[in-house]
Image: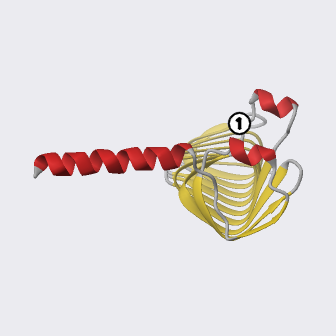
Amino acid sequence: MKNLVRWMTMVALATVSGVVSAASCWSPIATGETPETLQTHACWSLCVGAREGEANQITYRGLTLGVMHASMPFNDVLRVVKNEQCDFVGASVQLFAQTNVGRVRGASVTGLLSFHERVDGLQFALLSNDVKRVRGVQAAIGMNVADEVRGLQLGIFNATKQLRGIQIGLWNTNAAGWTLPLINFSW
């Protein structure tokens, strides 16, 4: 019996590994072009809504649920040829991580790590958030890092280069202003 359970577990893990390695974000409604750069996505998600495609841009509209979503990395050499953008309009909820060179208009909720180029709305992760520009709320139990914040950063450690708003956490740093415990603000 133990051998049967082990064998079934190994088959299940191999199947999941195969699916994840060849996974892409599936959407029941896909309009426009299917960019070649979609193949560079490493994601295992379902878009309950629509996926729109243009030359080098993909936009997911609605709710995107999954295990993880990663578009082409920012420093990928293919960006010289195809500068892909992956945008979310609505909510993207991922169990483990999301890394995205593009814009989120709505909410990004992640179990562990979240990296985006721009967030207009809410960016939440249990462990860590990183974004170039956030307008709204960036919250994590662990650490929030941003180049520019217009709104609220809430976490144990908050860091930004430019702050127009409030930071609440055990340690808050604003490169253009003060470094303070508990609360920091700048207008």
In the depicted structure, whether residue 50 falls above or below residue 165: below
Q: Residue furthest left?
A: 1
Q: Nearer the viewer, residue 73 or 141?
A: 73
Q: Is residue 75 visible?
A: yes
| Corner quadrant of residue 51 | bottom right
Residue 65: percent from left, percent from top: 57, 64
The residue at 36%/46% (across/down) is 13
| Residue type pointed to by label 1 | Pro
Q: Nearer the viewer, residue 100 or 17?
A: 17
The residue at 57%/46% (across/down) is 22
Residue 82: percent from left, percent from top: 85, 38
In the depicted structure, whether residue 55 falls above or below residue 79: below
Image check: 168 left or right of 134?
left
Residue 46: percent from left, percent from top: 60, 64
Q: Which residue is mark 1?
A: 73
Q: Nearer the viewer, residue 73 or 25?
A: 25
Residue 92: percent from left, percent from top: 63, 61
| Corner quadrant of residue 152 | bottom right
In the depicted structure, whether residue 122 falls above or below residue 128: below
Task: Answer few, some or many: residues within 10 Å of disc 1's Cα (few below 14, many 20 plus, some between 14 and 19).
Answer: some
The residue at 87%/33% (across/down) is 81
Q: Residue furthest top?
A: 77
The residue at 60%/50% (across/down) is 43
User: What element does badge 1 sit on?
Assistant: loop
